[in-house]
Image (spheres, grey):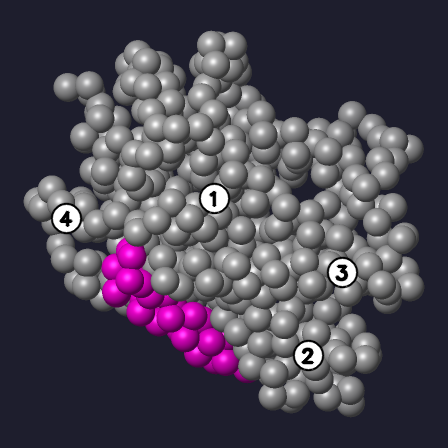
Amino acid sequence: MSTEREQFGSRLGVILAIAGSAVGLGNIWRFPYIAGENGGALFIICYVIILFCIGLPILMTELSIGRAAKKSVGYAFETLEPKGTKWHYFKYLIIAGGVLICAYYPVITGNILYYLCGVVDGSLLDKGISAHDQYQDLVVENSYKTVCFSLIAILFCACCSWFGIKKGIETVTKPLMFLLFIFLVVLCGYSLTLDGASKGLELFFVPNFEDMTLKSFLNMFHAALGQVFFTLGVGAGTILAYASYMKKGQSLFNESIIIASLDTIAAILAGVIIFSICTSYSISVGAGPVLVFESMLTIFKEMPGGHLFGSVFFLLLFAAAITSFISMYESTNSFMIDSFNVSRKTAITINTILVGVLILPACFASSFLADVKPFGMDIISFEDFIASNVLLVGGAFIFSLFCFTRYGWGMRRFIRSVNSGEGVKLSRFTIGYIKYAIPMFIFIVFVLGLIV
Ligand code: PHE
């Protein structure tokens, strides 16, 4: 196996690539509606506390393992585990989370691409047809369109990965992330000028303790924890894969704070945009996963400048989704490269065929397979539940045990790896907290995820 590993060209490149992995559908599409369903402001306070107290240390475990091993999850455990231990068996469970997300994430990305094209050429802005009917047309009547657009999204990612880390992934994610943040700020400014914006802001920022029960609190807590894992994209080996191409210049505590902050800023901006628009146009913020497709399109049909506003919005959503999908793709590619010693191009070819087949159940979830309802959920919701609530949480638990206990890599090596480089370092106080509290919290999430 070759020991020369490609690296990101710049610190900004690696931060934007990892932030690009974190900032995705989870922030712009999932966060606002989950916040809407779970009490708005209270959920957001809970989410931010959990993100920095639990999500941040887990992000550091993946970053430090990847940077120290210089390998993806396909060979990272083998490189760092104490002799004779069997941590590497867990790599299959970890990569399974990423693969399962690849089975539905490109489908939603493909839907966004379809909406982007339809809004840009104006065909979806026809006022004679309702946004609801247009969505049904895509996912039920003409689900082959979902397949085509998902395949285009997959091929786009394959092309980015084909050119490698610096020339492919870094070149694409850097400008896309810049554009994304600029668009978010512009759209946020615009949405604040809408008539109902102040009502949206109140819902989003002012906590309401009325009607709070223990059960609703536990539900909100669990939803916030799940959102943190999904939005940071931890537990699937994705961050680990990117970290394996990182240079040693900066402390990982430093980089984690920047990445988590960018992710939170993106989510808050998206929340303000969507809440302001929803309260201005009397749309329920708890409308669920279809919110972005049906409600936003309704708004773009009605509002002055809807063509431009809608094109920018779907472009933004597509950019966010694609940078996250590229990271999942890279994680499975590098897994194959490191585990089976194949070339990058062979790994990409196999992966593209594999993902192209895996997406089919999700593509037909509302048409031919509408009657298939494992545990009462449609196929996409079921895949999302198993990936986010079981596999990502399980993966994060394994990473934390590996880093924090003496049976694995161990706390001393972990801290040395996190603190090496310039910037903010982990203090003694945080070390005690991380070692005991984090695995316990993750375990609680895991159990809560299965019973609540
Ligand atoms: N963080 C991504 C998002 O918010 C999703 C993701 C999950 C990315 C797992 C990588 C791994 O959309």
Q: Is 252 situated above or below 197?
A: above
Residue 139 sits in quarter: bottom right
Residue 357 sits in quarter: bottom left
The alpha-carbon separation of the residues under discs 1 and 4 comes to 24 Å
In the rendered image, which residue does mark 3 sit on? 189
The alpha-carbon separation of the residues under discs 2 and 1 comes to 31 Å
* Magenta span of residues: 141-168
* Residue 76 screen position, x and y as percent: 24, 34
Mark 3 surroundings within 10 Å by alpha-carbon count, few (fewer than 14), some (14 through 19), many (20 or more): some
Left or right of 217, for residue 448 = left
Dot placed on the residue nearer the N-terminal end, 1 or 3: 3
Are the residues flagged by discs 4 and 3 in contact, CB closer than 8 Å? no
* Residue 192 screen position, x and y as percent: 82, 59
In the rendered image, which residue does mark 2 sit on? 308
Are the residues flagged by discs 3 and 2 in contact, CB closer than 8 Å? no
Q: Is residue 53 magenta?
A: no
Looking at the picture, which amino acid does disc 3 mark? Gly
Q: Secondary structure at mark 2?
A: helix
Relative depth, front residue between 12 and 383: 12
Frontmost of labels 3 and 2 is 3
Dot placed on the residue nearer the N-terminal end, 4 or 3: 3
Ligand 1 neighbours mark 1 (CB distance < 8 Å) = yes
Quarter of the image with the C terminus in it: top right
In the rendered image, which residue does mark 1 sit on? 233
Left or right of 268, for residue 63 = left
Residue 41 sits in quarter: top right
The alpha-carbon separation of the residues under discs 2 and 4 comes to 47 Å
In the rendered image, which residue does mark 4 sit on? 340
Looking at the picture, which amino acid does disc 1 mark? Gly
Relative depth, front residue between 312 and 233: 312
